[in-house]
Image: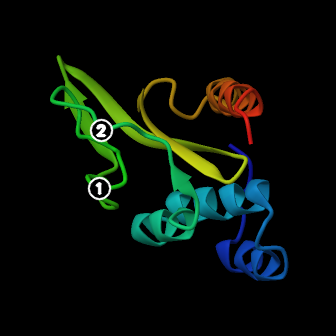
Amino acid sequence: MSALAEPEALLGDLAAAPEDDALRERAAIALEQRGRHREAVELLGTLTNLTAHDGPTLPCLCRRCLDPERIEAEADGVRFTRRFAVARGRVLYYWAPIEIADSPGLARSVRARLDRRLARRPG
């Protein structure tokens, strides 16, 4: 794993460019990597949470149900960790199996698909 980005430096950069979704996502990831989960969720709270209300297999990640401190869950003997993708002023939270959660390909794929779907939306 590469060196962890410093959240404070990223947050300083974000203060100068608050509309930069990629920077906001990197800052939130840096906070998460340091166990500052509530701060990461609060930082992403300015974005529209697209996560639909769901359940009961895994804890729901919609705006109303999201527990900032709940970053892991288990279902049918499989352990999951919470991840998110940011695109076009929106955030999508999702559960990923722990074994693949940190795969750069997974994060890139979710973000790219989210961006493509949002690009097709009117307005």
Residue at numbered disc 1: 64
Percent across and percent down for residue 15 are: 76, 82
Q: Marks 2 and 1: CB-CB under 8 Å?
A: yes
User: What is the three-letter code of the residue carrying label 2?
Assistant: His
Q: Residue at x 69, y 31 (%)?
A: 104
Judging depth in this view, the residue of 52 and 4 nearest the camera is 52
Residue 71 located left or right of residue 55: right
* Among the 4 quarters of the image, the one containing residue 108: top right
Percent across and percent down for residue 54 are: 27, 33
Task: Look at the image and tell me whether residue 39 can be seen.
Answer: yes
Is label 1 in a helix, a strand or a loop? loop
User: What is the three-letter code of the residue carrying label 1?
Assistant: Arg
Q: Residue at x 67, y 55 (%)?
A: 25
**Label 2 Cα neighbours within 10 Å, binned few <14 / some 14-19 / many ≥20:** few
| Relative to 30, residue 93 above or below | above
| Relative to 103, residue 17 above or below | below
Measured in 3D between alpha carbons, the distance from the residue under mark 2 to the one under mark 1, in whole angstroms, is: 8 Å
